[in-house]
Amino acid sequence: MAEPDSPDAPTATAPTPPARVYRHRLPTRIWHWVNAVTLLVMLMSGLMIFNAHPRLYWGQYGANPDRAWFAIGSTADTGYVRFGETRIGTTGVLGRWTDHHGKEQTWAFPGWATIPTSYDLAAGRRWHLFFAWILSIGLTLYMVWSLFGGHVRKDLHVRRAEWSPRHIWQDIKDHARLRFPKGEAAARYHILQKLSYIGVIFVLLPLMIFTGLTMSPGMGAAWPWLLDLFGGRQSARSIHFIAAWLLVAFFFVHIAMVLLAGPVNELRSMITGWFTLPRETGKGE
């Protein structure tokens, strides 16, 4: 005969649902998605503008006879990218490639990477300048909200303990080993996130805007101090190009981290604001 259950036996309980927190406020979510579209259009239209003269210089002047520190070009049968004196063959990708009609082209960047897809410098500039206004206005509003709405103080402020080399190195090692924060710690920005977001919002994006203004002859006449600040129009163009590709690098790292940390949860939090805290695991599990 089976023995009756002991009155002291533990009863099964339903697992506690994971906690949710309101992680991203509405201004952050709106700016995030508007900025994503804006920067994509500006990158692709900027590549079209670059196709008009795919060479970069330092200083006040730059033209075909001058020595460029960076160039994308082609010979009679090859495409290449040149950094200083180092030339790298890029046939089929940059400098010389085949379009969807099977015709060989010698623009620096292929049509699939530019707006518009066929060579049109005037249209590229119109796209670029229109979205530059969206970027500038959106960034200004977001920076003001971040400073006065508590976003910087609450989420981006780097505290004294976080400046410790040991703390930063530990965060780097955790990322390299794909060890992401759990529980309540997952809802807070860690030191690498803070530094990268601060760098993008308060350094790279303003740098893109002001170097873009410096390249405009009209703005150079109105604000000549911009030319002095960046060392000339051609130096500003080089800095603009470098900053753009640093933003591209940030984008790919950002996407990789979202995919590794849990894309559904991360995307949902940037759409609805609500973030599900990853469960903390015990040492014995």
Image (spheres, rainbow, N blue to C red):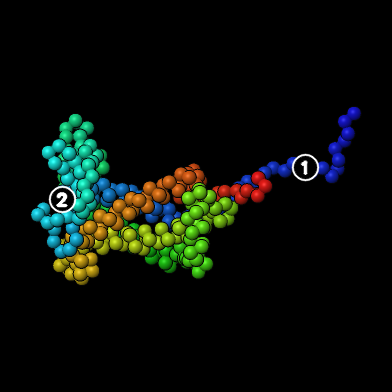
**Residue 238 at x, y percent in the picture:** 23, 57
Residue drawn at (27%, 53%) of the image: 131
Q: Mark 1: which secondary structure? A: loop
Residue that label 1 marks: 11
Q: Is residue 243 left or right of residue 29?
A: left
- Give the image location of residue 154, x and y in percent: 49, 64
Q: Residue under label 2, please give it.
A: 53
Badge 2 amino acid: His
Within 10 Å of disc 1 (Cα), the crowding (few <14, some 14-19, many 20+) is: few
Q: What residue appears at the point 72 percent right and 43 percent down from the top-left corner? A: 13
Q: In the visual, does 200 lie left or right of 44?
A: right
The quarter of the picture where the N terminus appears is top right
Disc 1 or disc 2, which is closer to the eye?
Answer: 2
The tag on residue 255 is: none
Q: Is residue 169 above or below residue 272?
A: below
Q: Is residue 118 visible?
A: no
For the C terminus, give its image quadrant. top right
Q: Earlier in the sequence, mark 1 or mark 2?
A: 1
Q: Is residue 119 left or right of residue 170?
A: left
Q: Is residue 259 above or below residue 149?
A: above
Mark 2 closeness class: few <14, some 14–19, many ≥20 residues within 10 Å: some
Q: Where is residue 253 shown, x and y percent of the image?
A: 40, 49
Q: Is residue 99 left or right of residue 66?
A: right
